[in-house]
Image (cartoon, rainbow, N blue to C red):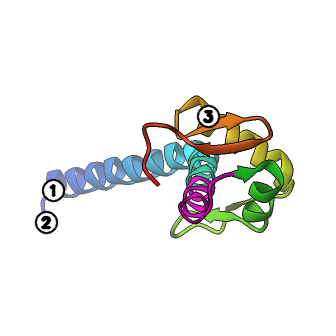
């Protein structure tokens, strides 16, 4: 084997290792935000499913739906879990009102006028 082949192999190995390590660091930095997005997405789907069967939902009902909700990414031991269901439900419903998925009527939330049940 020529010395130039060995040197090129070492350089190639170092570059591949550096890329994989950098990808892991970026993924780890974005993980908490991704987990929260997944948690909100699961909460939204539960609320939408509830609203298909019912006319309206309250903050307390949303908190009950969100109890024990968790999100985890594949190949990772980290997970996001709803600890305070009432606080999470308030944030979730506020987000859904802001994005036009539901409308607030008094203490109840109903599907947005443009959305079908």
Classify 70 as above or below 33: below
Kindly state the secondary structure of the residue where label 1 is placed. helix
Question: Which of the two labelled residues, at mark 3 and mark 2, occupies the earlier sequence position?
Answer: 2
Image depth: mark 2 or mark 1 in front: 1
- Residues tagged 2 and 1 counted as in contact (Cβ below 8 A): yes
Kindly state the secondary structure of the residue where label 2 is placed. loop
Kindly state the secondary structure of the residue where label 3 is placed. helix
Left or right: 9 in relation to 15: left
Residue 115 locus on image (x, y percent): 44, 44
Image depth: mark 3 or mark 2 in front: 3
Question: Residue 80: which numbered mark, if any?
Answer: none
Residue 93 locus on image (x, y percent): 69, 42
Residue 114 locus on image (x, y percent): 43, 37
Question: Residue 97: which numbered mark, if any?
Answer: 3
Q: Could one spot residue 82 in this view of the protein?
A: no
Who is closer to the viewer here, 51 or 97?
51
Residue in view at x 60 percent, y 39 percent = 96
Magenta residue span: 42-56
Residue in view at x 16 percent, y 51 percent = 4
Left or right: 83 in relation to 34: right
Distance of mark 2 from mark 1, alpha carbons?
A: 7 Å
Question: Residue 5: which numbered mark, if any?
Answer: 1
């Amino acid at each position: 084997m020529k010395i130039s082949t060995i040197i090129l192999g070492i350089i190639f190995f170092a570059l591949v290792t550096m890329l994989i390590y950098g990808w892991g660091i970026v993924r780890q930095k974005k993980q908490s935000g991704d987990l929260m997005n997944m948690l909100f997405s699961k909460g939204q789907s539960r609320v939408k499913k509830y609203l298909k069967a019912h006319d309206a939902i309250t903050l307390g009902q949303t908190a009950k739906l969100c109890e024990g909700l968790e999100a985890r990414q594949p190949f990772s031991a980290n997970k996001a879990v709803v600890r305070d269901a009432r606080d999470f439900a308030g944030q979730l419903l506020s987000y859904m009102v802001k994005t036009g998925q539901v409308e607030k009527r008094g203490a109840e939330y109903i599907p947005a006028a443009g959305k079908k049940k």
